[in-house]
Image (spheres, rainbow, N blue to C red):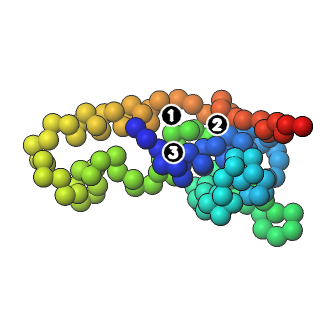
Amino acid sequence: MRLTLFTDLGLRTLMRLAGEPERLFTTEEISRDLKVSRNHLTKVVSDLAAAGFVQTRRGAGGGFHLARSPETIIIGDVARALEGDQPLVECFQADGGACTLMPGCRLKGRLAAAQAAFFRELDGMTLAECATPRPKIPG
């Protein structure tokens, strides 16, 4: 199984926020901490906000923070929200894709089971369990 880079960045962002759950963060600060593009992070934060994992504040003194306690945020829910409708393989697409092996394929069922097991494992972990404190700055 593989998560997209977008989801990976979303998870790392939430892990960082969970390290200081009461604090308001800026995209500049998190992009620097995670060494990622601020523009890309802005889109990630927007999707995290739309999914209800973070709250944002505009204007002077603005930023973002966790929308709820890290103990209530399930990692599997985050992965599902950020992955959206990304099918694992072509035949998982809503229209079945263009796979020429269907309907006789015997792999699809196993792939579906593997995907379910993957998310079941992520469903067993909360954000609180993988919170990350502020990175140490050398010097």
- Quarter of the image for residue 72 reads top right
Q: Residue at x 50, y 34 (%)?
A: 122
Residue at the far bottom in the pictured view: 59
Above or below, comparing residue 61 to residue 124 in the picture? below
Q: Secondary structure at mark 2?
A: helix
Q: Position of residue 119 (x, y in %)?
A: 44, 36
Report, in whole angstroms, how far the alpha carbon at label 3 lies from the one at label 2.
12 Å
Above or below, comparing residue 139 to residue 84 in the picture? above
Disc 1 target residue: 123
Graded by Cα atoms within 10 Å as few (under 14), some (14 to 19) or many (20 or more), the crowding at tag 1 reads: some
Disc 3 target residue: 79
Graded by Cα atoms within 10 Å as few (under 14), some (14 to 19) or many (20 or more), the crowding at tag 3 reads: many
Q: Residue at x 77, y 58 (%)?
A: 28
Q: Position of residue 81 (x, y in %)?
A: 51, 51
Q: Residue at x 52, y 49 (%)?
A: 5
Q: Position of residue 23 (x, y in %)?
A: 83, 47
Report, in whole angstroms, how far the alpha carbon at label 3 lies from the one at label 1.
9 Å
Q: Viewer-proximal residue, 84 or 38? A: 38
Q: Secondary structure at mark 1?
A: helix
Graded by Cα atoms within 10 Å as few (under 14), some (14 to 19) or many (20 or more), the crowding at tag 2 reads: many
| Residue 19 appears in the figure | yes
Q: Amino acid at mark 1?
A: Asp
Q: Position of residue 42 (x, y in %)?
A: 66, 62
Disc number at residue 127? 2
Report, in whole angstroms, how far the alpha carbon at label 2 lies from the one at label 1.
10 Å
Above or below, comparing residue 71 to residue 49 in the picture? above
Q: Amino acid at mark 2?
A: Leu
Instruction: Looking at the image, tell me whether mark 3 or mark 1 is earlier in sequence order.
Output: 3
